[in-house]
Amino acid sequence: MPRRLLLILCLLVPITAAAQSFAPAGWDAGLPLAEVPDLNPDPTIVEVNLTAKLADVEVSPGKRVHAWTYNGAIPGPLIKTRVGDRLIVHFKNELKEPSTVHWHGIRLPIEMDGVPGISQPEVQQGESFTYDFIVRDAGLYWYHPHVMSAAQVGFGLYGGLLVEDPNDGVGVADQVTLVLSDIGFDNKGVLEPADSGGSAGMVFGREGDYVLVNGRTDPVLRARPGAPQRWRIANMAKSRFFYLDLEGQPFTVIGADGGLQEYSVTTDILLVTPGERVDVIVAPKGKAGTPLTLRAMLYNRGYGSVQYRAVEDIMTVEFTDQPPITAAPVKVSRPLPVPTAEGATPVDVVLTLPPMENSKSEFRVNGVPFWKAKPFLAKLGETQLWIVNNESEWDHPFHLHGFFFQVIDDKGQPVRPLAWKDTVNVPMKTTVRLLVTFDERPGEWMFHCHILDHADGGLMGTVLVGPVAPTGHVHPKPPPR
Ligand code: C2O
Ligand code: CU
């Protein structure tokens, strides 16, 4: 073999040298995620049972809530797959209400998207539905119902879907998934009603009083000083924003919703809005006996989100007395396609909150709430530039089903580092531009604000990706609450 060719072949071999673990034994035992057995012996198929049911769940010592759960836990089990696997989920609904499972961020066929009345019928009490699809993209995704979403997610129905790429080259062995959420309940463990606060509650987006990391208040994570840890973070709260601070220590952001990003960036404060995921490396510095606190800082997402509110402690990092490590900074790179807005079809998406009528508020997209909306249209293969103009005085984490998008600046240039996104915050009185190619998979796909009270309050719509005949259905109004 010519030497030159041999050299090239060597360069192509992925570096699979196992990364070294530094974390102390049981470092993440304080924040375990429920697991679910894989029933299928085929190594490329993950097959699990997922049952929605009521259960008593302890979220902090002595504090129990009678919650809605997947398999009895909050969050539901972390489903672990490898990129390219087939995932089969036997979903059973043992709730008294209809439900479905939506696979947030996954590029799947419309029949598996979990939207009642659009991609499948509601799964009634006692009924089952089997979801079956390939996980094409590495990253952290999640699942939740798409029936009365604000209520059902707020009551505890959500869980993570981790799609790992063993050759992602990140090289950090100590990895933990952190599911951020909240829940509201009284001293008898009874859930706060989904309509609490009426229209004002809807407009604000209801937040629960108990802030949870992997279903627990203020859990402890242990670390060897200076050793790198990979945190896969997802915000599954129905409304709460997480603006994370680790006492000023840096987060190295290596990935976003749809896997690794173009290159890593370092930040001291990290905003994770509902629906979003971030992949970060932290190498916390400190010493035994002096723990660090991960805090949720105040972030102004609209009136009432900073006034009279306190910073929240959400997780404690305790150090071992092992000698500190000086780790080389983690660098990742992923050659993502550089998008161009040239030739893309512009689509205006205007988000408003008109003054109350009959003491009721509704959010609107292009002048209409979801229940009066007609689908947007897109051709198969078409690239569209969605100009999302938020005229309201509330931030809206904007989410599109089934397709990733890239964020484009006001000069038509992509925002760097490039990243695949399925949810992006559109701050109040601001315009955000998204470039999306409806590359395949015809069907009617949802978009909505991931403050789920806003979605149920009208801020939702669909895009009909052709060639499919419009179904002519009228979008249902959520049941009066
Ligand atoms: Cu998590 Cu319709 O979305
Ligand atoms: Cu919103």
Image: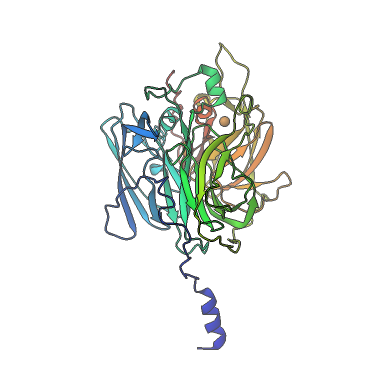
Residue closest to the eye, 187 or 97: 187
Residue 277 against residue 5 in the figure, above or below: above
Q: Residue furthest top?
A: 358
* Left or right placement of residue 477 versus residue 5 in this view: left
Please, which colouring scheme is shown?
A: rainbow
Q: Residue at x 47, y 69 (%)?
A: 16
Q: Position of residue 243 (x, y in %)?
A: 59, 39
Residue 459 against residue 242 in the figure, above or below: above
- Ligand 2, by image quadrant, is top right
Q: Is residue 270 visible?
A: yes
Q: Position of residue 100 (x, y in %)?
A: 37, 35
Q: Position of residue 451 (x, y in %)?
A: 53, 32
Residue 1 against residue 458 in the figure, above or below: below
Q: Residue at x 37, y 29 (%)?
A: 65
Q: Is residue 121 visible?
A: no
Residue closest to the eye, 318 or 129: 318
Residue closest to the eye, 109 or 427: 427
Q: Residue at x 74, y 46 (%)?
A: 411
Residue closest to the eye, 178 or 62: 62
Quadrant that contains the C terminus: top left
